[in-house]
Image (spheres, rainbow, N blue to C red):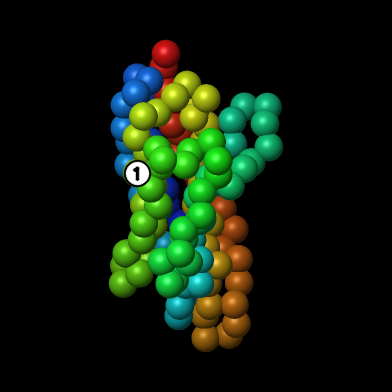
Amino acid sequence: QVQLVESGGGLVQAGGSLRLSCAASGNIFSINAMDWYRQAPGKRRELVAAITSAGTTNYADSVKGRFTISSDNAKNIVYLQMNSLKPEDTAVYYCRLDYCSAYGCYDSGWGQGTQVTVSS
């Protein structure tokens, strides 16, 4: 079983920046991919950014050029640097892992999330 702890959210003015972190712990042998999702009130959870163990990244069109995903594979941490924030970026942000333990490969499920609020 894997535990995820997201942090770094907060209240910021439009145009500002935040850096989110997600630390994974538990029975992890290797990580294949790490993702950031977000869910705004009344909306579906959506993929924001993803990074593979090889360093390949993918971004939602709405955040391209503003957000950067990175990871520290040795520490099982994934980051999301968010610049030029907009009010529409307001949401709870969650991370998710595609990982392998000694027993097989799994989806980590969700952590508790971290709230990001961007004021206009």
Q: Residue at x 38, y 48 (%)?
A: 68
Q: Residues within 10 Å of mark 1 (few under 14, many from 20)?
A: some
In this view of the protein, which residue sits in the foreground, 23 or 64? Answer: 64
Q: Percent position (x, y) of residue 82?
A: 37, 38
Q: Quadrant of the N terminus?
A: bottom right
In this view of the protein, which residue sits in the foreground, 110 or 77? Answer: 77
Vertical placement of 86 versus 98: above or below?
A: above
The amino acid type found where label 1 is placed reads Gln
Residue 93, visible in the rendered structure? yes
Q: Quadrant of the C terminus?
A: top left
Vertical placement of 93 versus 100: above or below?
A: above
Q: Which residue is the site of mark 1?
A: 81
Q: Residue at x 61, y 72 (%)?
A: 106
Q: Residue at x 47, y 42 (%)?
A: 64
Q: Residue at x 40, y 52 (%)?
A: 69
Q: Percent position (x, y) of residue 79?
A: 36, 52
Q: Percent position (x, y) of residue 38?
A: 55, 40
Q: Percent position (x, y) of residue 81?
A: 35, 44
